[in-house]
Image (cartoon, grey):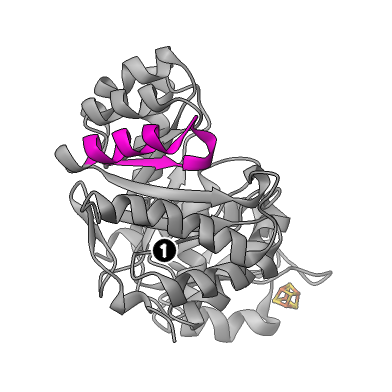
């Protein structure tokens, strides 16, 4: 028996509620130096535009801690401060009115420091994610039972202080181990769970690991917020996260995009067109299907069945809109035509 998604406690993070029957929240993390305010804010607000409801920033040093007030002010979404080793940074982040702290209490000097953070968070309505990563476990903690007992110790301290705004996560770079640990987590705690593969690799590897892990846990109704982690461009993270949710049947703001793998029959520069269209649809997602196909073999039907469909024919682009043939265009015109058709959808 698990505390499934709908049965978990609700936790407020700024204007977002995680847990209970609420939507699964997508989040990501910046890879800029947080004290570089301009770059960090640009990344936060682009991640928000791409579908992140929450964005996490690393607080590595005093410069990062100091700029949190400004980051919180300029951000379009609630900010999570990611703290390791230094309890004072967590206290400063709470003062700066971040919405949530992400901390692994095992990385602090002692539990007294964690308790100080709990008390400050409670006073200021800040949530805490207790995030245990198997990569940073104490040497004596090895088995799944020991890991869960460690989490129990941290959760008990929160509950002793009547602090319940907590989100839990246990991650390992091993997908199957993470699934097992999250199942045990959901069987033991009623708090929302943050899921995702950690240290998941570059985009191709991460896509496989993240999809496997997130889909498996969602099928068990485990997981209230997700992060796809990629060694690479953070802007890919929310798009992949939304695609995983969409393919699992969840309602997300994401244009349903179909494209063929291309083969020796391809009649157009499909990748060039696809990349241009993807930029448009990622930033302005609509609840429609767009198909981009290399030739008429599978292209005619896919194009006709889509809300906007394009297939290649002798270096030209045939466009359909809701089964109606719009015309045949060369590359200079096809994108313009696509944009005008796409703009008609809400
Ligand atoms: Fe090849 Fe045409 Fe099929 Fe694309 S639609 S994979 S180009 S046969």
Q: Kindly identify which residue carries mark 1.
A: 193
Determine whether, in the image, residue 161 is placed left or right of residue 65: left
Could you say where residue 240 lies in the image, as x and y percent from the top left? 53, 59
Q: Looking at the image, which residue is at 60% across and 67% down?
A: 145
In the displayed structure image, the side of residue 329 where residue 285 appears, left or right: left
Which residue is painted at 38% across and 73% down in the image?
Answer: 288
State which image quarter holds ligand 1. bottom right
Q: Is residue 322 above or below residue 207?
A: below
Image quarter (top left, top right, bottom left or bottom right) of the C terminus: bottom left
The verdict on residue 11 being magenta is no
Residue 181 quadrant: bottom right
User: Residue 72, how many percent across, how many down?
Assistant: 25, 30
Q: Is residue 176 above or below residue 42?
A: below
Q: Residue at x 66, y 79 (%)?
A: 296
Q: In the image, is 158 to the left or to the right of 196?
A: left
* Residue 103 lies in the magenta stretch: yes
Which part of the image, by quadrant, shows the N terminus? bottom left
Q: Residue at x 40, y 27 (%)?
A: 87
Residue 316: tell me if it is visible: no
Across and down, in percent, residue 170 comes to 54, 58
Of the pair 14 and 128, the residue shown nearer to us: 128
Q: Is residue 123 above or below residue 343?
A: above
Q: Where is 170 relative to 216, above or below? A: above
**Label 1 element class:** loop
Residue located farthest toward the right when viewing the structure as drawn: 264
> Looking at the image, which residue sits at the far top?
63
Magenta residue span: 99-121
Question: Crowding at label 1, few (<14), some or many (≥20) Cα neighbours within 10 Å?
Answer: many
């Amino acid at each position: 028996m698990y505390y499934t998604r709908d049965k978990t406690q609700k936790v407020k993070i700024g204007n977002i509620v995680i847990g209970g029957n609420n939507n699964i929240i997508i989040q990501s993390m910046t890879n800029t130096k947080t004290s570089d305010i301009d770059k960090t804010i640009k990344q936060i607000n682009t991640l928000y535009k791409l579908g992140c409801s929450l964005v996490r920033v690393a607080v590595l040093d005093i410069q990062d801690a100091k700029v949190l007030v400004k980051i919180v002010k300029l951000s379009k979404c609630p900010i999570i401060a990611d703290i390791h080793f230094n309890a004072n940074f967590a206290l400063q982040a709470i003062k700066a009115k971040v919405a949530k702290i992400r901390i692994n209490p095992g990385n602090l000097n002692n539990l007294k420091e964690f308790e100080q953070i709990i008390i400050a968070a409670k006073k200021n309505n800040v949530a805490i994610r207790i995030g245990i990563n198997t990569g940073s476990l104490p040497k004596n903690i090895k088995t799944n039972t020991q890991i869960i007992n460690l989490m129990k110790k941290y959760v008990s301290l929160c509950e002793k202080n009547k602090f319940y705004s907590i989100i839990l996560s246990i991650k390992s770079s091993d997908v199957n181990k993470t699934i097992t640990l999250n199942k045990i987590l959901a069987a033991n705690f009623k708090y929302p769970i943050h899921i995702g593969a950690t240290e998941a690799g570059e985009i191709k590897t991460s896509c496989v690991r993240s999809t496997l892990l997130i889909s498996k846990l969602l099928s068990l109704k485990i997981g209230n917020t997700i992060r796809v982690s990629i060694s690479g461009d953070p802007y890919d993270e929310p798009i992949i996260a939304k695609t995983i949710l969409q393919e699992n049947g969840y309602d997300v703001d994401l244009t349903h995009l179909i494209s063929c793998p291309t083969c020796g029959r391809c009649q157009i520069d499909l990748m060039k067109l696809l990349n241009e269209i993807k930029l448009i649809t990622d930033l302005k997602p609509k609840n429609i299907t767009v198909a981009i196909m290399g030739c008429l073999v599978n292209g005619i039907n896919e194009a006709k069945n889509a809300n906007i469909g394009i297939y290649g024919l002798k270096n030209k682009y045939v466009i359909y809109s809701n089964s109606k043939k719009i015309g045949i265009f060369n590359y200079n015109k096809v994108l313009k035509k696509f944009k005008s058709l796409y703009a008609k959808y809400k």
